Image (spheres, rainbow, N blue to C red):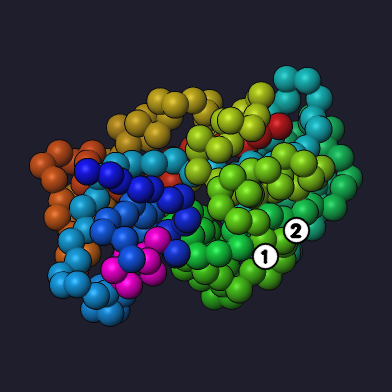
Amino acid sequence: MTVNYADVGSGAGIAAFAAKQADFGASDVPMTTAEQAAAKGGQVVQVPVDLGAEGVVYNLSLPAGSRLHLTGPVIARIFLGQISSWHDPAITALNPGISIPDARISVVHRSGGSGTTYIFSNYLSSVSPAWAAKVGAGKSLHWPVGEGAEGNGGVAASVYRTPFSIGYVEQSYSKSRSSALTGHTCWAERATGPDSSSPAQVLLGISTETLVALTAAIASIPGSRPSSSAASRLSSDTNLCGPAWIST
């Protein structure tokens, strides 16, 4: 048997699967009821399988040993275009004692339909009423500001080569591009050390009530088939963002 895999993003992948141009795929966001109904070839079965971390990456020169702290509401304001300078009081107040350049922020986002975009925008909707009202959550968005790049790799490369830029990527892309990392946790306004174990640490810190709620949300997806372990019932589409990786 020959298996051909193409990293095309959740939007294009779901479209190809629905058109029966692909036999199976993996997505950070589940297919909606409407997408499943429109899919050719019979019933769609969705199986949540894992927990993944997604992060915010930036290109900003800071003093040696310094780590930038950003909260979810501040990130939302940056991607709304309400904060356009790295030296904005909302950012400097979170980073006392750190010399932050007085430079304009360049926002980078995904250009096509993306599960990564869904997770990021769903999180921002949960922490920012302004974001929820103006942009909302989805695989494809009408971005208030910024330039689009194709795929996680395209966003990471654009941020890497563009001074004073900021974007969002799946964890491994931030790690492959950066030499120093810091972060914040989506579930709490506190700094955390970003490493490969951090997503699991976030999972372990979730209350039983929250875990049950997340599991129920996944199980309620039409066509889903949750597995036996709690961890495997959680997938990125739960919006368990974990650490937001920030590259210096």
- Quadrant where the N terminus is found in the figure: top left
Magenta residues, start to end: 13-20
**Left or right, 170 with reference to 88:** left
Label 2 sits on residue: 83
Furthest-front residue in view?
A: 1
- Whether the residues at callouts 1 and 2 have beta carbons within 8 Å, the answer is yes
Task: Name the foreground residue: 230 vs 108.
Answer: 108
Q: How many marks?
A: 2
- Quadrant where the C terminus is found in the figure: top right
Across and down, in percent, residue 41 comes to: 19, 72
**Left or right, 245 with reference to 108:** left
Give me the residue at 24% from left, 50% from top. Answer: 48
Across and down, in percent, residue 75 comes to: 63, 53
Mainly helix, strand or loop, the magenta region?
helix
Circle 2 — which element? Answer: loop
Disc 1 crowd rating (10 Å Cα; few below 14, some 14-19, many 20+) is some
Furthest-right residue in view?
A: 102
User: In terms of image quadrants, where is residue 128?
Assistant: bottom right
Amino acid tagged 2: Ile
Label 1 sits on residue: 80
Q: Could you say which disc has been placed on residue 226 in the image?
A: none
Across and down, in percent, residue 165 comes to: 75, 47
Give me the residue at 71% from left, 47% from top. Answer: 158
Magenta stretch contains residue 17? yes
Circle 1 — which element? Answer: helix
Across and down, in percent, residue 151 comes to: 56, 52
Task: Name the foreground residue: 244 vs 90.
Answer: 244
User: In terms of image quadrants, where is residue 224?
Assistant: bottom left
Disc 2 crowd rating (10 Å Cα; few below 14, some 14-19, many 20+) is some
Question: How far is mark 1 from mark 2, CA to CA?
Answer: 8 Å
